Image (cartoon, helix red, strand yellow):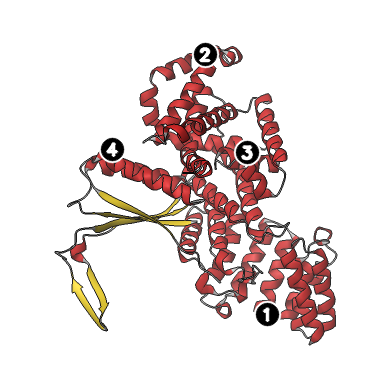
């Protein structure tokens, strides 16, 4: 089963040096263990844009978005046997944040990727 | 949380940690099968403690501490020290003293230990079934029951296979080996064979009613990826990973809503998994860069890649595929390769050219009970308008098919050929 982890945080600026090191270690282990298929951090929201449809109108708004509190910082895609493994993996990832950057606050959303259906 | 859920959660954590636990213990004990046993004991301890106490914040550290305690107990009991050479004992004592650093070092060095684990599990002294079972158990963290269900054999059979395999290793003194250099390349063949066996067991499900056993495919793919990490310079490892990723990329398109198989050329290519195709093509490129384009697995992957690259079935480069099968026939002289070449040739040059190759295979003893030979023959005859012969061929194929769904498919084709 494929899972996507989406990390959201209101924290300004990137992760601390210590956290980065630990995250790289974990990512390296997960890639070598064949579980992580893909992962990436996202460039700051200011460089992005939002393309919205509302009330029958399409509009494009360039960043930065002053009203935004929670920002998606990155994602990872895993291939795992099931939900329990995904949960364990996401918890381990978030425990790293707790241990190595205690002031950080955020959310890791764990979602199963829908399988294509014939 | 129900007990069942709690157990699944614990097993999930354990699966993540197991390779580190087992490699770490194997290094302490100089004995892979024993290390495996003691990590199982750590799992049992977790299953006993965590449902009551709750899962610790750093479950990996807890499991490691528990497993190491078991290993130290084992060493203290001295059974091991008496058996092994005195020098090994001195090494061990030295290692115990530097253990905290040793853990950190292991992060960088896990590749070597992992390789040792894989080569021990896939030792040529063991039967293929035993190698597969031991790999799934020691490297993928599957339980005996899960392995049994995946291979459709009784749990007791798998348990016995594992016990016997471990005994064979212990009796032969093969509990802690690292092949190097040329021996590594040589022994790698048996490892890749086991990984591919596990993949195919899940992918083709030769027996029973399950068309797909995705769990086995997933574990084989994972094993393959682990191998690319620990043996990155071996082209055939990348070739096998490419082959598995590219084949697995078609999983969603291979069956219809009722679970019946859809042949490759009839599949909806929009359902092919692009992430997996990308990974497969990248692995194939890596194999070629390392000089392994003509390897057994790389050539098969190159054939599958021709399909993956074609936007439509009609756009398939059949001449190229026929040429790759001819190359493959040189690497692995096999009537099955020849049968596949016949299909490619028929697509490139017409059914008559393909049938000529198929008919040369009719007397091949290895294909006597192989249902795909009459199935391909029926298909080519039907295209040539020789419908009565086609019907007869499909009926032979139906009688030989080992899987209910394939048998039904062949029966339907026989009826269709007769009707026209």
Numbered circle sitting on residue B349: 1
C-alpha span from label 3 to label 2: 28 Å
Identify the subunit bearing mark 2: B
Q: Nearer the viewer, mark 1 or mark 3?
A: 3
> Which residue lies under the disc numbered 2?
B76
Contact (CB < 8 A) between labels 1 and 2? no
Mark nearest the camera among 1 and 2 is: 2
Mark 1 touches mark 4? (CB < 8 Å): no
Cα distance between the residues tagged 2 and 4: 34 Å
Q: CA distance from mark 1 to mark 4?
A: 65 Å
Of labels 4 and 3, the one closer to you: 4
Labels 1 and 2 share a subunit:
yes
Outermost residue, left direction? A66
Q: Residue furthest bottom?
A: B420
Q: Residue B331 in the image: x percent, y percent?
A: 66, 56
Q: CA distance from mark 1 to mark 3?
A: 46 Å
């Amino acid at each position: 089963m494929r899972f996507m982890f989406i990390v959201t945080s209101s924290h300004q600026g990137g992760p601390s040096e210590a956290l980065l090191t630990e995250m790289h270690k974990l990512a390296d282990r997960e890639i070598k263990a064949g579980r992580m298929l893909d992962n990436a951090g996202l460039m700051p929201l200011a460089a992005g844009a939002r393309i919205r449809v509302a009330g029958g109108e399409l509009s494009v708004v360039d960043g930065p978005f002053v009203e935004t509190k929670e920002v998606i910082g990155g994602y990872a895609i895993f291939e795992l046997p099931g939900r329990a493994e995904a949960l364990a993996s996401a918890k381990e990832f978030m425990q790293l944040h707790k241990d190595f950057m205690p002031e950080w606050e955020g959310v890791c959303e764990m979602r199963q990727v829908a399988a294509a259906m014939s | 949380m129900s007990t069942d859920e709690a157990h699944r959660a614990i097993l999930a954590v354990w699966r993540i940690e197991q390779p580190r636990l087992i490699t770490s213990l194997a290094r302490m004990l100089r004995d892979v099968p024993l290390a495996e046993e003691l990590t199982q004991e750590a799992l049992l301890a977790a299953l006993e403690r965590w449902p009551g106490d709750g899962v610790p914040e750093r479950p990996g550290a807890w499991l490691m501490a528990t497993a190491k305690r078991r290993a130290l107990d084992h060493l203290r009991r001295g059974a091991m020290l008496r058996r092994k050479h005195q020098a090994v004992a001195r090494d061990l004592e030295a290692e115990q003293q530097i253990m905290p650093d040793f853990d950190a070092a292991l992060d960088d060095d896990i590749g070597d230990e992992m390789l040792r684990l894989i080569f021990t599990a896939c030792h040529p002294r063991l039967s293929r079934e035993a190698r597969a079972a031991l790999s799934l158990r020691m490297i993928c963290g599957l339980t005996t029951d899960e392995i049994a269900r995946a291979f459709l054999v009784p749990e007791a059979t798998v348990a016995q296979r594992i016990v016997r395999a471990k005994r064979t290793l212990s009796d032969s003194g093969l509990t802690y080996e690292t092949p190097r250099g040329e021996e590594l390349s040589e022994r790698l063949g048996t490892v890749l064979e086991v990984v591919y066996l596990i993949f195919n067991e899940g992918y083709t499900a030769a027996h029973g009613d399950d068309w797909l056993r995705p769990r086995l495919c997933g574990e084989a793919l994972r094993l393959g990826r682990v191998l690319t990490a620990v043996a990155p310079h071996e082209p055939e490892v990348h070739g096998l990973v490419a082959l598995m990723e590219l084949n697995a990329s078609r999983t969603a398109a291979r069956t219809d809503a009722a679970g019946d198989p859809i042949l490759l050329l009839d599949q909806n290519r929009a359902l092919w998994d692009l992430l997996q195709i990308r990974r497969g093509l990248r692995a194939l490129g890596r194999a070629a860069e390392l000089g392994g384009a003509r390897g057994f697995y790389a050539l098969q992957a190159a054939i599958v890649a021709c399909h993956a690259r074609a936007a439509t079935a009609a756009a398939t480069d059949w001449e190229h595929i026929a040429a790759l099968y001819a190359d493959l026939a040189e690497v692995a002289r096999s009537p099955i390769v020849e049968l596949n070449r016949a299909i490619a040739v028929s697509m490139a040059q017409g059914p008559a050219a393909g049938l000529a190759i198929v008919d040369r295979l009719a007397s091949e003893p290895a294909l006597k009970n192989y249902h795909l030979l009459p199935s391909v023959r029926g298909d080519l005859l039907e295209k040539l308008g020789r419908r009565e012969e086609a019907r007869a061929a499909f009926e032979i194929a139906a009688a030989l098919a080992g899987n209910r769904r394939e048998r039904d498919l062949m029966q339907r084709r026989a009826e269709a050929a007769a009707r026209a």
